[in-house]
């Protein structure tokens, strides 16, 4: 096949700003397999949903016949055991249950709900910080100055990283995330990769120290709960805790950045919805759900495989073959969603695939929802006269975690906080 | 506010139990136990829960995610 | 040209719904949502607006909800004439009238029968009247039982370890009450899920601190001098002292009011076709009487068009929607009710779900997880096909097994699955009790091909 194969065009960075026409083409062939040894791309809503609930599908990439290149960079270094995102039941279930016992119900039902005030506080401070920049030149980069620092601060508070360590922590994360860039990540000698490896080691050592502290003196934070083991499955080993913490950090970071940035971009392209959100904070709830359908931060799941031959739409996918589940394409499948190319937060019955489904459904989904709801609502309320300075904006390279690298906005000012 | 969850549809994703813990709770790993009646002070949180349910299993007065079912004009007075 | 009847009906017809619970309410909402503009009468024997029953044995007993606060939310306004607290006592099929207990009559152009089921009472009427003996089906039952449980009884004695009995036992243990459960079969839930899964349920009971007695029958309930229950006598000779007895022996269909009406109504329900139209006793389908919910008995293509009786919440909703649609549609626009049976129960912190008809299964294979860990998916086979599946805390995989059932996939399941354990490599007998023995267990019953229930003589249980 040539470079004009559809999947290559989808992964081509030139398509990043608007992959949706390619997805439409893709859906015409429900199971697309273009190259010997290449992936099988599944792009229709009902097929994707079925495979997400199919026990013949594995998330463990050791099951792949040819592991080859992986588009979704793993959060783990070579030292750490695989996190649950890359494991199958029962090991996946055990680790996820323990992680969940520190994060949500039944053991910590108020952990996320209890962070709402804190999330609003962080957003408020970031917006306060934008005020001077806005006053200065009237131009801000929503990615660097808002969407990027927000989730890493949140994860620090969630894990229990002391405030005074947050800058150091964020520094390591910045370097690690930069190292995930597809441009450099296959070149181990690249400076970004060397820096990322070093940052991983430093972050790992820092977290290990914190874990030890928390096991001696538990506090009301996730790390303390992870090492204490509140559920019937007991505690994680230190290595498992590190692996899980790094997963939450990396998997939870870029996706949230993209959700917020894609969100603001979409709202600025549909100003009537931005206006409505400014008037009605409750509108943020359906807006975020529709964003997860319309511009999902995770566009596809690229490293599933089947542990036996399976048949989808008359196509046999052989055991061990790589399967791409094209979530963003399924989200715009006209067989499932009426007028799928329309951004419509009032859409009823919006069972989108933005967080996946089945046992691997996004672990951090409730937190991501709250973060995006609060961030977008506050942006709508407080940015005065926001406008896109570049449309489309420059995008990150990854076809998997898709979002703008920068989102330059012109603003007339930042309004003061309305209330506490 | 009256609430009902279609527990056939429910797959225990627990988004509701994260977002409105006063109304929705998990009993064990995936059994949802909920209050079939909640005061209006919980309305905002219940709205978040209804919208966040990945399988749209929650119906609450005035918040039904499935209220689309075209409301029928043409009723005689 | 003549206006089609259903067009006239939609505009100004009279629809009567007998049964003001889940199925009746959802049917009424669907009628209005689809544009029915005529008069709508809702008849219910209980004095309450439609309320939800599953929480009565779960959230209510766990103290998470008040027994009188489980009213169902409304999908929309239905603008109905509510006749609550008045039972229907007769049907004049030829005259198209429903007779009410207060002497009134309500004429209809279309009738929906959604009278559901009631708790099977303790067979000895004197013993059933003892203070402290309860059933749990209605809001009134829940209010009374809840009040008594809050008064810290010394022991709760549950007769029958089907789903309801097990849920009651679980909730009582959760509240710290001492509980004894007596079950006629060798384990809880065997009527619904077979002995392989029943053994897991028995472990849940025992680990939950329930004093579980299996293979026993309750021979008598003993009262004290002032008529309060004080003990239960068992067939193994033992006596259990108790001050609360909950009779959980399954359900009885509310069809007595149809005796003599000419409809094919009996102890197994009211027979109807796939379009929810009732059959008469001659096996001829009626045109103006429809049936939905627990009281219905309808043929299902997945199970060889045998009639199924389902006590399933989801079936009540789905069948009500289909019945309502068909009531006001021309024959070519009617839809069949093809719901795959689906059921859930929550007990001892475990989420139990089933789809299909497990009790038709002769063998079971644990295709994911492990019985010992109480987290698994079991698949039931019948004549070389997948007929049902059950999950314990593994509900996210069930959609896959539903497709296997719908497509009649071969059994045993030969392909590999994630989390397959050595125990799940081959099927074992599902070990259901002899179906000819009376059992309270299954919430779905397969009952042959004949619309008229001739195998059972109709004998009203109450005059």
Image (tube, coloured by chain):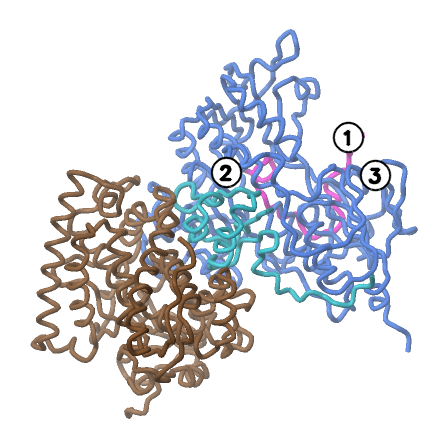
Chain colours: A brown, B cyan, C blue
Residue C11 position (above or below residue A272):
above
**Callouts 2 and 1 close, C-beta under 8 Å:** no
Residue situated in front as seen by the camera: A123 or C209 = A123
Residue under numbered circle 2 = C190
- Specify whether C460 is left or right of C368: right
Measured Cα–Cα span from mark 1 to mark 3: 12 Å
Question: For numbered disc 3, what is the local secondary structure?
Answer: strand
Chain of the residue that carries numbered disc 1 in the rendered image: C
Magenta extent: C434-463
Q: Nearer the viewer, mark 1 or mark 3?
A: 3
Q: Secondary structure at mark 2?
A: helix
Q: In the image, are marks 2 and 1 on the same chain?
A: yes
Question: In terms of secondary structure, what is the magenta stretch mainly?
Answer: loop
Answer few, some or many: residues within 10 Å of disc 3's Cα (few below 14, many 20 plus, some between 14 and 19).
Answer: some
**Marks 3 and 2 close (CB-CB < 8 Å):** no
Tell which of A114 and C257 is nearer to you.
Answer: A114
Q: Quadrant of the N terminus of chain C?
A: bottom right
Q: Going by the image, does C311 lie left or right of C401?
A: right
Label drawn at residue C89: 3
Q: CA distance from mark 2 to mark 1?
A: 29 Å
State which quadrant residue A258 falls in.
bottom left
Q: Which residue is mark 1?
A: C462
> Disc 3 or 2, which lies upstream in sequence?
3
Same chain check for tags 3 and 2: yes
Q: Visible in this render: residue C86?
A: yes
Quarter where residue A318 is shown: bottom left
Circle 1 — which element?
loop
Residue C358 coordinates in the image, percent (x, y):
52, 48
Instruction: Tell me: A80 left or right of A44.
Output: left
């Amino acid at each position: 096949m040539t470079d004009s194969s559809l999947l290559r065009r989808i992964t081509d960075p030139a398509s990043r700003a608007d992959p949706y026409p390619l997805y439409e083409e893709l859906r015409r062939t429900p199971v697309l397999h273009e190259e010997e040894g290449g992936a099988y791309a599944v792009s229709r809503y009902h097929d994707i949903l079925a495979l997400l609930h199919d026990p013949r599908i594995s998330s463990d990439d050791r099951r792949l016949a040819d592991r080859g290149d992986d588009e979704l960079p793993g959060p783990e270094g070579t030292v750490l055991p695989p996190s649950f995102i890359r494991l199958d039941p029962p090991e996946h279930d055990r680790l996820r249950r323990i992680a969940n016992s520190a994060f949500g119900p039944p053991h910590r039902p108020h952990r996320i709900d209890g962070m709402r005030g804190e999330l609003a506080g962080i957003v408020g401070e970031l917006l306060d910080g934008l005020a001077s920049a806005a006053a200065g030149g009237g131009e801000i980069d929503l990615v660097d100055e808002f969407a990027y620092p927000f989730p890493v601060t949140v994860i620090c508070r969630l894990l229990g990283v002391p405030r005074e360590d947050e800058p150091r922590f964020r520094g390591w994360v910045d370097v690690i995330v930069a190292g995930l860039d597809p441009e450099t990540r296959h070149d181990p000698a690249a400076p970004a990769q060397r820096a990322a490896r070093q940052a991983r080691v430093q972050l790992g050592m820092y977290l290990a120290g914190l874990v030890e502290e928390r096991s001696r003196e538990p506090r009301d934070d996730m790390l303390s709960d992870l090492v204490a083991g509140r559920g019937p499955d007991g505690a994680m080993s230190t290595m498992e805790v590190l692996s899980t913490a790094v997963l939450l950090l990396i998997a939870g970071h870029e996706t949230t950045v993209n959700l917020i940035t894609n969100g603001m971009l979409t709202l600025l392209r549909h100003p009537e919805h931005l206006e409505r959100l400014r008037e009605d904070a409750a509108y943020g709830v359906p807006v975020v759900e529709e964003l997860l359908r319309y511009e999902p931060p995770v566009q596809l799941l690229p490293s599933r495989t089947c542990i036996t031959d399976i048949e989808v739409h008359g196509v046999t996918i052989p055991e061990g073959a790589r399967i791409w589940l094209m979530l963003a394409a399924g989200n715009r499948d006209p067989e499932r969603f009426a007028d799928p190319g329309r951004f419509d937060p009032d859409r009823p019955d919006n069972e989108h695939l933005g967080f996946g489904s089945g046992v691997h459904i996004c672990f951090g989904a409730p937190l991501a929802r709250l973060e995006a709801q609060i961030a977008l609502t506050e942006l709508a309320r407080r940015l005065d006269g926001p406008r896109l300075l570049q449309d489309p904006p420059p995008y990150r390279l990854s076809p998997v975690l898709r979002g703008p690298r920068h989102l330059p906005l012109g603003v007339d000012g930042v309004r003061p906080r309305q209330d506490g | 506010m009256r609430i009902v969850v279609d527990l056939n549809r429910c797959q225990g994703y627990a988004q509701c139990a994260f977002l409105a813990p006063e109304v929705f709770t998990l009993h064990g790993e995936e059994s949802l136990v909920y209050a079939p009646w909640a005061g209006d002070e919980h309305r905002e949180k219940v709205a978040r829960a209804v919208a966040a349910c990945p399988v749209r299993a929650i119906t609450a007065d005035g918040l039904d995610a499935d209220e689309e079912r075209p409301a029928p004009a043409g009723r005689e007075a | 040209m003549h206006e089609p009847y259903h067009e006239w009906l939609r505009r100004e017809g009279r629809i009567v719904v007998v049964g003001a619970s889940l199925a009746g309410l959802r049917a009424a909402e669907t009628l209005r949502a689809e544009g029915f503009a005529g008069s709508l009468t809702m008849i219910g024997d209980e004095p309450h607006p439609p309320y939800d029953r599953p929480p009565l044995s779960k959230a209510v007993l766990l103290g998470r909800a008040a027994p009188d606060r489980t009213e169902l939310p409304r999908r929309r306004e239905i603008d109905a004439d509510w006749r609550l607290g008045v039972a229907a006592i007769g049907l004049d099929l030829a005259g198209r009238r429903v007779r009410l207990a207060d002497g009134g009559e309500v004429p209809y152009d279309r009738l929906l029968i959604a009278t559901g089921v009631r708790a099977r009472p303790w067979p000895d009427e004197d013993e059933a009247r003892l203070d402290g003996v309860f059933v749990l089906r209605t809001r009134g039952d829940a209010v009374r039982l809840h009040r008594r449980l809050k008064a810290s009884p010394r022991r709760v004695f549950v007769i029958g370890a089907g789903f309801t009995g097990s849920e009651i036992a679980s909730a009582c243990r959760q509240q710290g009450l001492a509980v004894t459960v007596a079950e006629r079969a060798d384990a809880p839930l065997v009527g619904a899920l077979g002995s392989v899964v029943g053994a897991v349920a028995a472990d849940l009971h025992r680990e939950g601190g329930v004093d579980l007695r299996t293979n026993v029958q309750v021979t008598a309930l003993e009262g004290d001098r002032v008529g309060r229950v004080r003990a239960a006598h068992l067939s193994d000779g033992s006596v259990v002292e108790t001050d609360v007895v909950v009779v959980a022996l399954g359900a009885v269909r509310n069809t007595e009011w149809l005796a003599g009406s000419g409809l094919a109504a009996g102890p197994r329900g009211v027979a109807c076709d796939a379009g929810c139209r009732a059959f008469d006793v001659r096996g001829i389908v009626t045109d103006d009487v429809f049936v939905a919910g627990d009281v219905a008995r309808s043929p299902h293509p997945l199970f060889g068009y045998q009639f199924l009786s389902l006590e399933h919440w989801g079936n009540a909703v789905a069948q009500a929607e289909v019945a309502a649609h068909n009531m006001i549609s021309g024959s070519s626009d009617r839809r069949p009710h093809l719901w795959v049976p689906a059921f859930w129960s929550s007990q001892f912190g475990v989420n139990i779900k089933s789809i299909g008809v497990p009790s038709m299964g002769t063998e079971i294979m644990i295709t994911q997880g492990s019985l010992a860990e109480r987290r698994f998916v079991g698949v039931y086979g019948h004549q070389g096909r997948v007929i049902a599946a059950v999950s314990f805390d593994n509900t996210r995989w069930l959609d896959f097994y539903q497709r296997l059932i719908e497509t009649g996939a071969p059994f045993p399941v030969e392909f590999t699955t994630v989390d397959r354990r050595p125990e799940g490599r081959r099927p074992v007998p599902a070990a259901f009790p002899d179906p000819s023995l009376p059992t309270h267990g299954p919430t779905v019953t397969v009952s042959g091909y004949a619309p008229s229930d001739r195998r059972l003589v109709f004998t009203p249980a109450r005059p």
